[in-house]
């Protein structure tokens, strides 16, 4: 697990990141990996002297299986509030179908990089997308009364209720899949958007960059790829200019 700032870490599951923020004995978790990533998540938490029971709240950027799958294992052992945008809740609970074209992805499965990635994520439980019960939304716009005082930043496009989380004290922005720095299916290793096949709306995903650019952040913790340090405006400029086809 990589330390990002005082009391902040980024950990990695199967090609996907999560983030931990500590305040005293209390932890906030941002995203949770695939279902099978729970063991890695638990190991990360132990490596900083804590256990799963120290998680006081989970913030969800969006309801794709690689970001909420690990919650199945977490919630079976530790009852903890799971918070996300109201527009994202029906996707998490299964009331609404998740966007992103699975069939289009399957049509690309003949490509070696896609086939390898699909094999890897399926072994991590990508197809075990169970409805998430008991998730809720925050009662106000933030800063939320949680470690790091996070401010939700609405960034719909990748999914309808996608949310980034800004930690003003540290200048850190967890961008989820609204802005990534690497992905096994893209060639870019600078800030970029995910390819169309993963997005509910490409126009929305571009619009979300405008929302991210308004935040006074200089450290980006993406949903996929490494931490990126520099002004968010520069990251957004790069994301607008980098092509993102598979
Ligand atoms: Zn996603």
Image (cartoon, rainbow, N blue to C red):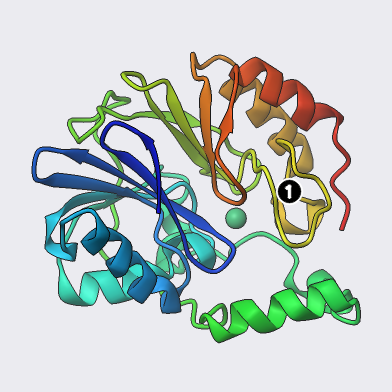
x then y, percent, for residue 223: 55, 49
Residue 186 visible in the shown view:
yes
Is the shortest distance between ligand 1 and the CB of mark 1 under 8 Å? Answer: yes
Q: Residue at x 32, y 38 (%)?
A: 8
x then y, percent, for residue 185: 78, 61
Count neighbours of disc 1 (C-alpha within 10 A) and say few if under 14, some if 14 to 19, many if 20 or more: many
Q: Residue at x 40, y 65 (%)?
A: 93
164 vs 73: above or below: above
User: Image quarter for residue 90?
Assistant: bottom left
User: Image quarter for residue 155?
Assistant: top right
* Closer to us: 97 or 32: 32
User: How many tags in the picture?
Assistant: 1
Residue 130 visible in the shown view:
no
Q: Is 88 displayed left or right of 103 in the figure?
A: left
x then y, percent, for residue 200: 69, 51
Q: Residue at x 35, y 22 (%)?
A: 170
Q: Quadrant of ligand 1?
A: bottom right
Q: Is 184 displayed left or right of 6 in the figure?
A: right
User: Image quarter for residue 86?
Assistant: top left
Q: Residue at x 84, y 52 (%)?
A: 187
Which residue is disc 1 drawn over?
Answer: 194
Q: Is 171 displayed left or right of 83 in the figure?
A: right
Point out the image quarter for the C terminus.
Answer: bottom right
Q: Is 26 displayed left or right of 46 in the figure?
A: left
At numbered mark 1, what does the secondary structure look like: helix, strand or loop? loop
106 vs 82: above or below: below
Point out the image quarter for the N terminus.
Answer: bottom left
């Amino acid at each position: 697990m990589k330390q990002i700032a005082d009391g902040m870490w980024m950990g990695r599951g199967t090609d996907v990141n999560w983030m931990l923020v500590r305040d005293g004995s209390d932890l906030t978790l941002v995203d949770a990996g695939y279902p099978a990533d729970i063991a890695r998540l638990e190991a990360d938490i132990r490596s900083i002297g804590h256990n799963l029971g120290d998680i006081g709240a989970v913030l969800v950027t969006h309801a794709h299986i690689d970001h909420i799958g690990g919650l199945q294992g977490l919630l079976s052992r530790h009852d903890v509030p799971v918070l996300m945008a109201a527009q994202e809740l029906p996707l998490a609970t299964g009331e609404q179908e998740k966007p992103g074209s699975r069939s289009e992805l399957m049509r690309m499965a003949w490509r070696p990089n896609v086939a390898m990635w699909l094999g890897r994520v399926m072994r991590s439980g990508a197809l075990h997308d169970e409805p998430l019960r008991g998730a809720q939304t925050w009662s106000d716009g933030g800063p939320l009364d949680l470690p790091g005082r996070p401010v939700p930043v609405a960034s719909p496009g990748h999914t309808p209720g996608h949310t980034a989380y800004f930690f003003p004290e540290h200048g850190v922005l967890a961008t989820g899949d609204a802005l990534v720095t690497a992905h096994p299916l893209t060639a870019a290793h600078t800030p970029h958007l995910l390819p169309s096949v993963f997005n509910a709306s490409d126009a929305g995903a571009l619009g979300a960059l405008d929302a991210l650019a308004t935040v006074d952040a200089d450290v980006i913790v993406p949903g996929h790829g490494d931490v990126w340090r520099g002004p968010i405006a520069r990251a957004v400029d790069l994301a607008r200019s980098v092509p993102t086809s598979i």
